[in-house]
Amino acid sequence: MQCAGWLVFLSAGFLVSGCNGGDGEDVVDKSSFQMPIKENTWVRKEKVRKTKNDFFSSAGKKNVEVPVDSTLATKLKTPVSLSISTEKECLQLTNAFDKKRTEVQKRGGLWHAYERVPEAKLYSEYGMQLDSQTNRLVFSLKYLCKNAQGFRLTGWGAETVRKFKSMGKESFRKHFRDLGEAPADVDNWIRFAEFSIQSKDRKIPYAKIGESLAKAQPLMDLYADLSQRKIDDNTSLQTFLTEGSSLLSVINENFTTDPRMVLALQDEEIHPFEGLKGEM
């Protein structure tokens, strides 16, 4: 005999379902199964000093390419000497990187460094990209330090994996599709849960992450230096522009050639760095 089912939507965002003597959970908080917003991973939340005039002065500009200095690029790719063997040491350095990029961006970021010089405004897109990619670099390194000895799931991630384990793949899929969730979203949650379970015991030696940190150190140093560079003639302007272009080129290349950075971005595609969002 089929039971009479009922569904009630409440204004608080909960779905309450019931069936006399039916199996399964009676109350499901759908809001807990919304994927974290991935854009938050890379976008800084610190307020930067941009006036309305600054914003509109850069609108509609065309990107202008600046040549990369191959000699400087080679120098920037030369890692410093570092020895990292523990999570504490790893996080100490990434926190120092985070503090440095935060200080720069509270002053307006490299975007502002370009915008404050009339002759450099045409190239301010480089500043925006440098701010964004530096965020990406720091957050990826911090993620690696925190998850070197296996995934640390919290919040949405931990709850998703718990339900996936208790229900099983097909029951999990049917349960949330029956609740009206988009099939593509449910498939992504399954992919996330399977990936998290498979990677739970993955180990990344801190010494290897240390190699990535050693590569990042000269990049962070130049990023901070450029943010306060004094530009008072054409020579200093050209040096500033060339160094900015070279720095961006090396950072971007680092995301495709450093094995740990490649791994971090692969993880981020499946597992948004939710644990870092509160620290941005």
Image: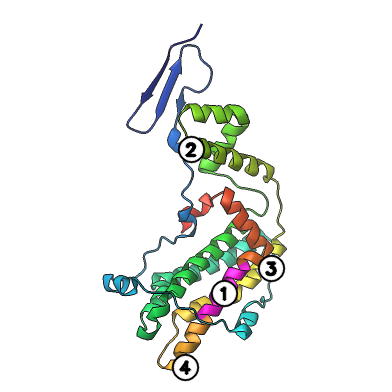
Residue at 55% over, 42% down = 157
Q: Which residue is mark 4?
A: 235
Residue 172, how many percent across, how many down? Answer: 57, 30
Which structural element holds mark 2?
helix
Indicate whether 145 appears above or below 48: above
CB-based contact (under 8 Å), mark 3 and mark 2: no
74 in the magenta segment: no
Whether residue 22 sits left or right of residue 60 in the image: it is right
Query: Of the residues shown, which amino acid type is indicated by label 4?
Result: Thr
Q: Earlier in the sequence, mark 3 or mark 2?
A: 2
> What residue is drawn where x is 43% and y is 37%?
31
Image: magenta residue range: 244-254
Label pair 1/4, CB-CB below 8 angstroms: no
Amino acid type, label 2: Phe
Q: Counting residues from the N terminus, which is met first, the one under dot 1 or under dot 2?
A: 2
**Looking at numbered disc 1 in the image, what kind of residue is underneath it?**
Ser
Q: Nearer the viewer, mark 3 or mark 2?
A: 2
The circle drawn on residue 211 is 3
In whole angstroms, how far apart are the C-alphas of marks 3 and 2?
37 Å
Q: Which residue is mark 2?
A: 33
Residue at numbered disc 1: 249
* Location of residue 142 (image quadrant): bottom right
Identify the element where label 1 is drawn.
Answer: helix
| Mark 1 Cα shell of 10 Å, populated few (<14), some (14-19), many (≥20) | some
Q: Earlier in the sequence, mark 3 or mark 4?
A: 3
